[in-house]
Amino acid sequence: MSRTIFITGGARSGKSVFAEKLALEFKAPLCYLATAQALDGEMTDRIKLHKDRRGERWQTVEEPLDLSAALSDCDGRHQVILVDCITLWLSNLLFAYENLDGDLEERIMRDVRQLADTLSGMTTTVILVSNEVGMGIVPENRLARLYRDIAGRANQALASAADEVHIVISGIPLRLK
């Protein structure tokens, strides 16, 4: 039976490692749906480290914008799909949509609602990794505040749609739901 597992926590809290351990409880084939884009050398190095850590057991699918379509395409072809990460996806959407007319936050939240709808129809278990970005100080600029607000709303919507929710703090996972 498929389910959606949502994992959140701060930067470098151990979210991805925990998510990968959960995914390894499933038999192959395993899918890693990556939202990161290698836009500079440092990010290229980070992506390589993640790929090297996962090894050959994983099929990597890279999709920075259309997560719903990528999930639908992977559904039924894998035992589990790990999406890492939602907050990078939101950042990608923010920059893709920033010069379009209309309410930027609402446009992105439509994509989040579409993702939640896609998750409800999946036959493959999906593990979502997201950062908890709203626990610090209020950002000083409008774009950063908008991003924080969107990430908070998106996390709430996806956690609500998930069957399981975990938070990872200092490498220790805690099940919330």
Image (cartoon, rainbow, N blue to C red):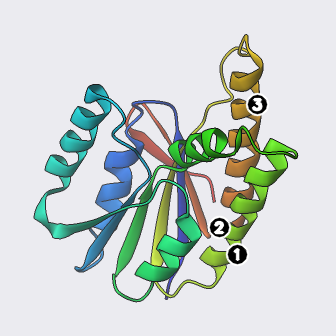
Does dot 1 land on a helix, a strand or a loop? helix
Res 165 visible:
yes
Q: Is residue 87 left or right of residue 32?
A: right
Q: Residue at x 67, y 49 (%)?
A: 155
* Distance between mark 1 and mark 3 Cα atoms: 24 Å
Amino acid found under the numbered disc labelled 2? Leu
Give the image location of residue 51, x and y in percent.
20, 50
Which of the two labelled residues, at mark 2 and mark 3, occupies the earlier sequence position? Answer: 2
Q: Residue at x 49, y 89 (%)?
A: 1
Find residue 45 and report its horizontal and vertical position in percent.
22, 33
Query: Which residue carries the number 1 mark?
Result: 117
Per the model, the C-alpha gap separating discs 1 and 2 is 5 Å
Residue of label 3: 146
Q: Quadrant of residue 165?
A: bottom right
Mark 1 and mark 2 residues within 8 Å of each other at the beta carbon: yes
Q: Label 3 sits on what residue type?
A: Leu
Return the residue at label 2.
115
